């Protein structure tokens, strides 16, 4: 079996990688690991949709994978998702793909520039209808993700996103991974650990260390079940 693990930064998944046997570092973005009889390619895509789209597209163009996992930390729009909690993101939207019309935001679908059901979109959303099915993923709370190139910290813009999309989690790469994996028909899952609430920016209230710790524990469980 061959698996692709995608993370924006090495920091987010370093503890898990430290438990694997690394057999080659191709470059600063691609690392190759082994767990039991399973080959794991690790792509450090960089932060944001642009870098992720480019490097992920480049990787998928020349390689075939049985499974893919996007792992990282993210923010919570919901008080039901607590800091440190690990969630399985099953739907993604892009919150800044569109236009402003006065005080309102209109998506490219609402503007009529794209059909909201243009594959792989479904009613304007990217939905993982058939995620990887393992007990370690099944026990995770499911969440609706919102992807943006700006981490939101302005109460007015946060409220607009909440009213428009009703997301529960925010990242800067999720939708790019969804688009690529859905298009290439690679079974996948997006796993995120909550590091902060999406609110007026106050890093004193963030806990990325706890999020990384819990994310990597979840990755150990998930890969322990998948790899044979």
Image: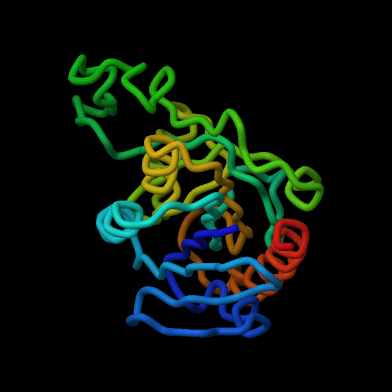
Residue in front for this viewpoint, 42 or 178:
42
Q: Is residue 38 above or below residue 53?
A: below
Q: Where does residue 92 sit, x and y in percent of width and height?
A: 47, 37
Residue 70 or 61: which is nearer the viewer?
A: 61
Residue 159 is situated, as x and y percent measured from the top left of the image, at 45, 37
Viewer-nearest residue: 107 or 49: 49
> Where residue 87 sits in the image (x, y, percent)?
67, 50
Determine whether, in the image, residue 69 is placed left or right of residue 43.
right
Side of 58 relative to 184 (left or right):
left
Image quarter (top left, top right, bottom left or bottom right) of the C terminus: bottom right
Count of numbered marks: 0
Residue at 71% from the left image edge and 41% from the top image edge: 133
Residue 59, quarter of picture: bottom left
Relative to 96, residue 31 above or below: below
What residue is shown at x 55% (from left), y 68% (from top)? Answer: 40
Q: Residue placed at 39% from the left, 50% from the top?
A: 154
Q: Quadrant of residue 196?
A: bottom right
Q: Is residue 50 shown left or right of residue 46? A: left
Colouring mode (rainbow / by chain / secondary structure / one colour): rainbow
The image position of residue 217, as x and y in percent, is 74, 69
Apparent side of residue 44 relative to residue 137 in the rendered image (left or right): left
Residue drawn at x 29%, y 61% is 55
Question: In the picture, which quadrant includes the N terminus?
Answer: bottom right
Q: Is residue 53 above or below residue 16?
A: above
């Amino acid at each position: 079996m061959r698996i692709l693990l995608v993370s924006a930064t090495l920091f987010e998944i370093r503890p898990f990688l430290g438990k694997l046997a690394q057999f080659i570092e191709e470059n600063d973005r691609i690392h190759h690991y082994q767990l039991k009889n399973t080959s794991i390619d690790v792509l450090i895509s960089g932060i944001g949709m642009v870098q992720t789209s480019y490097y992920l597209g480049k990787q998928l163009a020349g390689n075939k994978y049985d499974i893919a996992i996007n792992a990282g930390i993210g923010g919570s729009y919901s008080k039901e998702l607590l800091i440190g909690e690990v969630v399985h993101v099953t739907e993604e939207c892009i919150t800044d793909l569109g236009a402003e019309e006065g005080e309102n935001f209109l998506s490219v679908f609402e503007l009529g520039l794209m059909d909201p059901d243009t594959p792989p979109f479904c009613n304007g959303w990217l939905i993982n209808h058939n995620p990887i099915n393992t007990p370690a993923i099944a026990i995770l709370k499911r969440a609706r993700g919102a992807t943006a190139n700006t981490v939101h910290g302005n109460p007015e813009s946060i409220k607009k996103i909440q009213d428009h999309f009703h997301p529960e989690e925010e990242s800067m790469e999720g939708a790019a991974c969804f688009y690529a994996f859905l298009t290439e028909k690679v079974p996948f899952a997006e796993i995120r650990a909550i590091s902060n609430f999406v609110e007026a920016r106050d890093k004193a209230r963030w806990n990325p260390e706890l999020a990384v710790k819990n994310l990597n524990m979840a990755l150990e469980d998930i890969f322990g079940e998948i790899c044979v």
